[in-house]
Image (cartoon, rainbow, N blue to C red):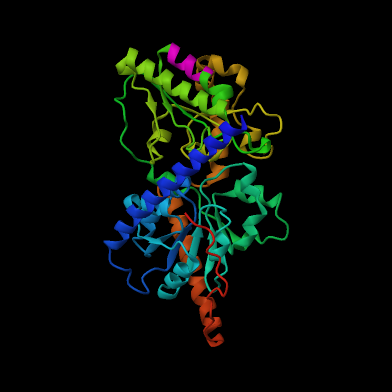
Amino acid sequence: MGVVNDVKLGWRVGMDLLASRRSQRSLRGKLAGRSPFRPHTFRIGIYFADDDVNMYQIRQWYKPLAELAKTWPVVILSRNATAANVLLDESPVPVAYVRKVVDLETFIAEQDLHLVLYVNQNTRNFQMMRYGRRWHVFINHGESDKMYMTTNQFKAYDYAFVAGDAAVERLGRVLWDYDFDKRAIRIGRPQADHYSGALPYTPDDRGVVLYAPTWEGDRAAAAYGSIATHGVALVRDLLASGAYRVIYRPHPRSGVVDGAYAAADREIVALLAAANASDPSAQHVHDTGAELGWQLQAADVAIVDISAMVYDRLAAGKPLLITRPVNPQAQIDSHGYLSDCEWLDAADAPRIVRRIDALSHDPQSAARLAHWVAHYFGDTTPGAATARFHSAVEHLLEEWERFAALHAADGDVDERDEDPDDSDSD
């Protein structure tokens, strides 16, 4: 058995290496065909050190960044070849590939980055955060009540852009000696101002249910995924009813840890394909696209796991059910929306049609939903969150100018890394 596992591991390593080399060749070709950036062009940088498997974390910021770039030039700093390859193809704002620390230093020396925004907690963020005389701002890749959202790593950044009152309350229960009034700036959910995308089906009299589960997690405390516990049963019931169109949008990492989870994912995909083959007008959707927006607006009801998708949907202000984790060690925030949400237990998944019908006729549920939408995101009037996002950026740019004037007599500081760690490779 050990020999078989070693062979499988060797095969995966070999395939990863081959993919990396292909990506490097493609990237070199793209970079060779473009002109260098003009010096002193960018004031705002988005730092992204991950590979392409975590592209979802930055993709959701594409449209808000494109809108921001109409006022202030924005650049994405990519540290990984596979991600840079994708970013160069699809990003609406310029991309700089800065794999090595020396590349990063060269870019910083040529530009005037006043704000550096971070969408995740990659450990390589600290290779960027060593550079002072600029604001380092954590903007995250979604709002949620997962334990990730209360990490003490928030303190490492000069500022954090958070969604609303719920985020500040959540952090306030965990972070000690943190100046929330100054460092946690509420901006709402600017992504909600850019929900778009063409429907991949023709609307009819069917109800639309979005099932958007997260991955299985890499530890019991984060075991929020429902594909193996709820997913197959609820999809079967929805398909059997004939009254609903299913949009199945699994997390990109689904099944990377647990083989049973991967098998359940494949079963759901097969169920949807079989249902479409039997009735082409059903047009069920297995959604693996990069764009998130149309799904949240189109669905009459959403079924999601404890993840950022809860709050992506909450920002749309439309009905949703949250799958209750089966693992008793999964940590659940008992203070925010999850203390008052509509839970879906695994035992009820096979009767999801009945549960959806009850939810759609419950005025108390609708009132609770409206309360929590305001608590998490503030004013959700179209355009309001974008205005708050731009206002927060403008405030920090003004603060940069103020501090630059205060320290004008300090002289130049050599920020080059005397011992750059370039050991991380693609």
Q: Is residue 155 visible?
A: yes
In the rendered view, would you say 404 is above or below 327? below
Q: Is residue 140 left or right of residue 297?
A: right
Q: Is residue 63 visible?
A: no
Question: Residues in magenta?
Answer: 233-240
* Residue 62, horizontal then vertical, whole percent: 39, 51
Q: Quadrant of residue 215?
A: top right
* Residue 367, horizontal then vertical, whole percent: 55, 31
Residue at 40% x, 61% y is 97
Task: State which quarter of the image contains the N terminus.
Answer: top right
In the rendered view, would you say 124 is above or below 218? below
- Given residues 106 and 279, the one toward you in this image is 106
Query: Would you say residue 234 sits in the magenta stretch?
Result: yes
Q: Is residue 272 left or right of residue 231?
A: left
Query: Would you say residue 219 sits in the magenta stretch?
Result: no
- Given residues 331 and 47, the one toward you in this image is 47
Hey, which residue is sitting farthest front in the picture? 3
Residue at 46% x, 67% y is 104
Residue at 30% x, 35% y is 198
